[in-house]
Each structure stands twice: as C-alpha cells, then as structure tokens.
C-alpha cells in the first residue's frame, strides 16, 4: 500500500459533480503537483483531502490508516479534528492572526491542545505543584519545537514580530511553520506562487525544495508549469472535476 491513497473521491454540490472519481497514490517524501484551469476543482479536491469538506464518496488512507471512508458510520467532530491534524494546509491568504506574534501564531494550536492535556492531568493528579510542573514542561516543549521550526525557516529573529511587520515571504513561512508544528503526514499548498513576482516565486520554490529534502510529503496546486516541473515527482492535471492526465516527473 502507498503512503497516501485517495480512492474514488467525489463531491457534488446541488446535484452537480465538483470533483468526480479522483484516484491517486503518493509515496512518503514525494511531491504531487495538481495542475488545471481555474474552476477545474483543484481547491475542492484539496479541501476534501484536508477534511475541511467531506467527500460524498471516497476513501483516504494515510500511512496505513483509514483517515476517511464514506462507507464508515459518521465520525464525531472530536475524531475528525484528530484526523484533520494528519494533513496540513497552507492557505493562499495565510490566515495569520494579526494580533498575535509569529511565535503565538505558530504555537496556538499546540497550546490549545496542551490546555486539554493539563485539564486531564489536573483531574487525575490533585497536587498543585505537580500540575504546575507538568504545564511548565509542556510549555517549554512547545517553545523548543516552535523555535527549531522557525529557525529552520529563517524566522529565528522574528519570533516576537507581528504579521504586519513581516515581508510577504516571511508571512508565508510563518503559515508553513504553523502547519509543520503539528507534524502533518502531508502538507498541502493551494497556489503558493500565484500573483507573485519572479523573485518571490523563487523564494517559495526554495522553501518547498528544502521541505522536500527533509522528506516532507506534499501536495501542491499551481498554475505554473515551470514550478511544477521543478518540484513535482508526480503531476495530475484536472479538468471539469476529473483527472485528465497523470504523469511521473523524472528529474534529470
Ligand atoms: N461551495 C460551493 N458551492 C457551489 N459551487 C462551488 C462550491 N465550491 C466550488 N464550487 C464550484 O466548483 C468548481 C470548482 O471550484 P474550485 O475547486 O475552486 O476550482 P479551482 O480551484 O480548480 O479553481 C467551480 O465551478 C466552483 O464555482
Ligand atoms: Mg482554486
């Protein structure tokens, strides 16, 4: 079985197929690029893979686990949230919180998660000091992890900056760091280079190449053939909700 298997994904809205019978496989560390005209269904496919929307039919397997199966009984929101973390998504508009620093934007999800852990711990362990030590330890771990990811993305000196103080590229890297901190099995990008000038496009390509060198499995939607040819191991082309072409990209 492959690392990621998308099987028979279909989604219809108002009885009209937006994506129809999508199938592909991806190995760990590979990069899949999705090409296609505007309106082809690329974003919808990515949102369904991310479980932001649920496909009407289909199955998603990641790393030997069934992440979604339309034949399965309805999954609870809690379970959905857990599975959701397996798949990271970097939005086109980044969706950073303007009132939070880089560090806070990146650590927010983990901190919320830790709050739950601390509450559970408190219920079991009544000793106040122990609970405090536990929560300090978690806080420290989050800081160390975030600092490492931010350093690796060249944001080591921006921990306390606010989004408005960052360049476009720094904002994008913050959004990438925020996704990476949850250790996603696959990281998805929706048009990371759209409407960029060539120097920024180069910056994005270099970050994505670095992630690829670290064996981060990725799915990337783009319009740009040059970019696709540089980073992709596999390419699928979509049109009217279907895959009309699929190829392996041999890098020379
Ligand atoms: N929530 C929705 N309701 C109705 N139509 C939608 C919805 N989401 C997407 N569509 C339609 O589905 C088609 C594919 O959209 P999208 O996935 O955004 O394409 P792409 O990302 O390839 O440009 C478009 O025609 C779009 O208008
Ligand atoms: Mg789109």
Image: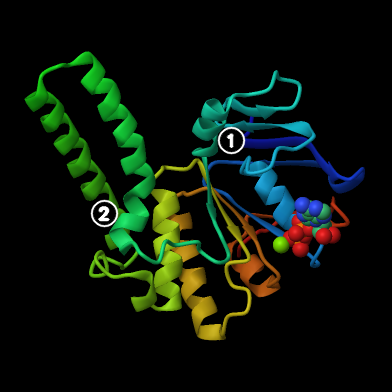
Relative placement, left or right, of 38 versus 82 is right
Which residue is pictured at 33% across the width and 61% down the height?
100
Residue 89 is situated, as x and y percent measured from the top left of the image, at 54, 52
Say whether marks 1 and 2 touch (CB < 8 Å).
no
Q: Quadrant of the N terminus?
A: top right
Q: Is residue 251 left or right of residue 135?
A: right
- Mark 2 burial class by Cα count in 10 Å: few <14, some 14-19, many 20+: some
Q: Which residue corresponds to mark 1?
A: 3
Against 178, is 84 above or below?
above
For image coordinates 36% across by 57% down, the residue present is 105
Q: Is residue 126 left or right of residue 123?
A: left
Q: Position of residue 112 (x, y in %)?
A: 35, 40
| Residue 163 image-quadrant placement | bottom left
Q: Secondary structure at mark 2?
A: helix
Determine if residue 246 is in view: no
Q: Identify the residue at image location x=67%, y=50%.
A: 46
């Amino acid at each position: 079985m492959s690392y990621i298997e998308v099987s028979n994904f279909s989604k219809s809205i108002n009885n009209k197929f937006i994506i129809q019978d999508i199938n592909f496989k991806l190995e760990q560390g590979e990069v899949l690029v999705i090409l296609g005209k505007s309106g082809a269904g690329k974003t919808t496919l990515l949102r369904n893979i991310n479980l932001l929307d649920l496909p009407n039919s289909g199955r998603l397997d990641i790393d030997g686990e069934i992440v979604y199966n339309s034949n399965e009984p309805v999954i609870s929101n809690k379970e959905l949230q857990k599975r959701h973390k397996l798949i990271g998504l970097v939005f086109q508009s980044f969706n950073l919180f303007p009132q939070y620093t880089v560090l806070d934007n990146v650590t927010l999800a983990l901190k919320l998660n830790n709050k739950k852990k601390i509450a559970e711990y408190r219920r079991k362990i009544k000793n106040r000091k122990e609970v405090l030590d536990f929560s300090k330890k978690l806080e420290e771990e989050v800081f160390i992890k975030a600092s490492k990811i931010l350093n690796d993305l060249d944001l080591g000196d921006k921990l306390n900056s606010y989004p408005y103080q960052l360049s476009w590229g720094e904002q994008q890297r913050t959004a990438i760091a925020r996704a990476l901190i949850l250790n996603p099995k696959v990281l998805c990008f929706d048009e990371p280079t759209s409407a960029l000038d060539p120097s920024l496009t180069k910056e994005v390509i270099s970050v994505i190449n670095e992630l690829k060198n670290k064996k981060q499995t990725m799915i990337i939607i783009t319009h740009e053939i040059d970019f696709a040819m540089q980073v992709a191991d596999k390419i699928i082309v979509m049109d009217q909700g279907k895959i009309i072409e699929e190829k392996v990209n041999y890098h020379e």
